[in-house]
Image: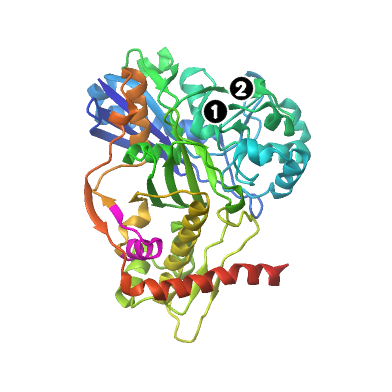
Amino acid sequence: MTFLGIDIGTSGVKALLIDEAGKPIGDASAPAVEPVRPHPGWSEQNPQDWWTATLGAIDALKAKHPAELAAVKGIGLSGHMHGATLLGDNDQVLRPAILWNDGRSAAECLEMEAELPSLRDLAGNIAMPGFTAPKIAWVRKHEPDIYRQLKRVLLPKAYVRLLLSGEAVEDMSDAAGTLWLDVAKRDWSDELLGVTGLTRAHMPRLVEGSAIAAELKPELAARWGMGKVVIAGGAGDNAAAACGIGAIRPGEGFVSLGTSGVLFVSNDRFSPNTEGAVHAFCHAIPNTWHQMGVILSATDSLNWLSRITGKKQAELSAEAEAQFKGPGETIFLPYLSGERTPHNNAGARGSFTGLSQSTETAQLAQAVMEGVTFAMRDCQRVLADAGTRIDRLLAVGGGSKSALWLKMLATNLDMEIALPEDGDFGGALGAARLGLCAATGADPAEVMTMPPIKTTIAPDRSLSAAYSDQYARYRALYPAIEEARS
């Protein structure tokens, strides 16, 4: 038997095969058409692009591993969270999906909280423009013709599952990011749905991430040479990544330096901290929750600097490391797309301060890396305010390839950070593990193990005081700049 994990991202889809022991066999990817920004702060994508990329990735995997793909018994799905996929009659897509990093619905968030004062208590989260429900509130106000045709709202991976199986099903971790779920009860909330004029009829059926959600359509199974295949509930991308690195027990977590940045920790109970804009969601594992501090521009901040300087990310990182002696004069606020934790401000904007005639790209790159690091320190601070303790932290994402960035993080978070051995420990692996659990009934605690560790990065105590002083200056800048902008 083999098992397939499918990770649906905004830039493409990755398909990963694992064996019964959970060992990767092979993978394949297919690109998707990049999201578009019709207006500043907007971010949209055609759902058909996810499906085209999914078919392309699995077809490519069949070309490389036909026998192993034919042995698949379980499929798991991972996907980018919060995206609003609006379907009408016969599940026809009504408009481009509004994505996780779309900030147009800030006004609707305020209106929703005013209409339902208990919203934060039920959802365990602040109403943020990134979540799904405020997007539907925006559509109701600004695109009433579309809203009147609305029959169903699905998240990205649930839309792909619909096309794979014909079933509209969602797992708890992804559903928790809609702002329609009673996160403590792990069930849709009629009150939260009512704020956007929807009912349970508009929602997919709910299952746990490791449970069977549906079966693969026979015609697709025939296309890939498979027999009967079950599809697991799966997980939102961060919960899937946690399954991939084995962060499912209380106190286990990871720091992700991807396009966005995440500080993730598993919990044995529902532990919200809405004042600090902490995300408190269901995990993909039954009777487990998790918290996240989320920043919107992590490696994307270095991508931005790369675009305007003409230098590649790796070059910028190397320049910063070559001249690094400690905190620099320049401070960067990484709010290029607004910010979630801890500010919950879609209108926040990035900035450099402390520039001088001697500032060159190496200093700018260091400042960007430090700014993202300080934003992750903000996340740690508000998680601690919620009473959360992180016992073990692994590093994942493209930014974790930078030794300097990891050293900055370990020093500022004041804890060791473990770096896994080279390999894929992301959403596709976590999804495949969930597919294994669904198909075999295996205990997730036995399947979701941590990978071998390549190295552990310790804090540099000689820089702790200097970084604490610089972090204090960083924290003072946001309110001062926001006051000047208002």
Q: Residue at x 39, y 52 (%)?
A: 255
Image side of residue 112 versus residue 306, left or right: right
* Along the line of sight, the residue nearer the viewer: 369 or 193: 193
Q: Is residue 59 visible?
A: no
Find residue 91 and name its label. 2
State which region is magenta.
Answer: 404-418
Q: Earlier in the sequence, mark 2 or mark 1?
A: 2
Q: How many marks?
A: 2
Where in the figure is residue 118, as x and y percent of width and height? 70, 38
Q: In the displayed structure, would residue 337 be above or below residue 452?
A: below
Name the amino acid type tagged 1.
Arg
Q: Secondary structure at mark 2?
A: helix
- Circle 2 crowding by C-alpha within 10 Å: few under 14, some 14–19, many from 20: some
* Along the line of sight, the residue nearer the viewer: 471 or 20: 471
* Along the line of sight, the residue nearer the viewer: 192 or 238: 192
The residue at which mark 1 appears reads as 186
Name the quadrant of the C terminus.
bottom right
Image side of residue 147 versus residue 288, left or right: right
Q: Quadrant of residue 180?
A: top right
Where in the figure is residue 41, as x and y percent of width and height? 63, 53
Name the amino acid type tagged 2.
Asp
